[in-house]
Image: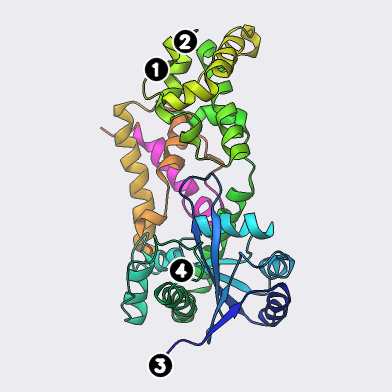
Amino acid sequence: MGIDIHWIRDNDSLGQFCTEWQKLPFVALDTEFMRVDTFYPIAGLLQVGDGQRAYLIDPLTIDNWQPLAALLENSAVVKVVHACSEDLEVLLRLTGSLPAPLFDTQLAAAYLNLGFSMGYSRLVQEVLGIELPKGETRSDWLQRPLSETQISYAAEDAVHLAEVYTQLRPKLSDDKYNWVLEDGAELVANLRREVDPYEVYRDAKLAWKLSRAQLAVLRELCAWREREARARDLPRNRIVREHSLWPLAKSQPDSLGALAKIEDMHPRTVRQDGEFLLDLIKRAASVSPDQWPPAVPEPLPMEASTLLKRLRAVGQAEAERLGIAPELMLRKKTLESLLKSGFPNGPYQLPDSLRGWRRELMGQALLDSLATAGEQP
């Protein structure tokens, strides 16, 4: 039986259907977009599934997104997605809003121990026994008209996502269902947090190897790169390549010739922004020591790996007890932050990134594990 597909190509139709969807317990959401040479994703198609039909929304012919924004923000309607980080960016860019509550079927599968980070096709195969056609994910979603294959692919996504939700939801205990929504809210909160361009340098590769004076240069380079990527709507590496940042801050070239010799420096960057970069480096290098950023902590030494394994074991034991995919329990970055708070001799502090049910169920066990580590023969 063919899928019942309904196209939405104008503002009035979108408004009418959003009013209808407001009455539903859930809607399935998916997006198709292009992101090849841009900082921001460009929406090519939005799909909504209500459990019965597939609705295909054409973002190239609609300019009033307020009705969809209202639906996304309606706390009475669960928004069902799959591995949604880029979908969230598309929705935020189009509507200015983000979905809440958010149910990510990839997370739900991990909470049911079906698998961690499962791709959509595999999950549909696992839950519904349906094999999805491949091959349209990387096609041109901005072309018009869309091909029949693209339309079929997009519609199937919306219909099956709704079906996967109706299968998974009853299998989740109340606790696990709430944890899926909690993790969904965390994904949304992370996207809402405005990245301060002046904090980006902390995550630059090898930043810990630089002096505080050199970090002052790296901070300015990273901040400028972040702002320019957004302003020009270009990928960050089109502004300055990632691998050039550290040698720029380290060697601080003072001529276009020296700049061109920096590792992985693209000739286009030297042509377009070379003079500006030289001036930026010169100004950043001349700030007074009281304006230098604090040193970036070194990575944990090899001997910390034993403690890291102990901490992982806490998560694995709890995962086994709860029947959850172990990878879902404790992120490596969270455990490293915990260790960095007091390595090697303590006392240790739980990091802010350990939140919600994870902190409640495992926080004390993690601290206890570290407290007894020194007592081992």
- First in residue order: circle 2 vs circle 4: 4
Quarter of the image containing the N terminus?
bottom left
Mark 2–mark 4 distance (CA, rounded to whole Å)? 49 Å
- First in residue order: circle 3 vs circle 4: 3
Which element type, helix, strand or loop, lies under badge 2? loop
User: For the point 37% across and 75% down, which residue is it?
Assistant: 124
Three-letter amino acid code of the residue under disc 2: Pro
Mark 3–mark 1 distance (CA, rounded to whole Å)? 60 Å
User: What residue does disc 1 label?
Assistant: 262
**Label 3: how many Cα within 10 Å (few below 14, some 14–19, many 20+):** few
User: What residue does disc 4 label?
Assistant: 105
Picture coordinates of residue 237, whole percent (x, y):
46, 34
Three-letter amino acid code of the residue under disc 3: Met
Quadrant assignment, res 75: bottom right
User: What residue does disc 2 label?
Assistant: 253
Which element type, helix, strand or loop, lies under badge 4? helix
Report the magenta stretch's main SS. helix
Which element type, helix, strand or loop, lies under badge 3? loop
Mark 4–mark 1 distance (CA, rounded to whole Å)? 45 Å
The coloring applied to the image is rainbow
Mark 3–mark 2 distance (CA, rounded to whole Å)? 66 Å
Q: Are marks 2 and 1 in contact (CB under 8 Å)?
A: yes
Question: Which of the two discs, 3 and 4, sits closer to the camera?
Answer: 3
Is residue 249 visible in this depiction of the protein? yes
Picture coordinates of residue 351, whole percent (x, y):
53, 39
User: What number is the disc on residue 154?
Assistant: none
Three-letter amino acid code of the residue under disc 1: Ile
User: What residue does disc 3 label?
Assistant: 1
Residues drawn in magenta:
354-373
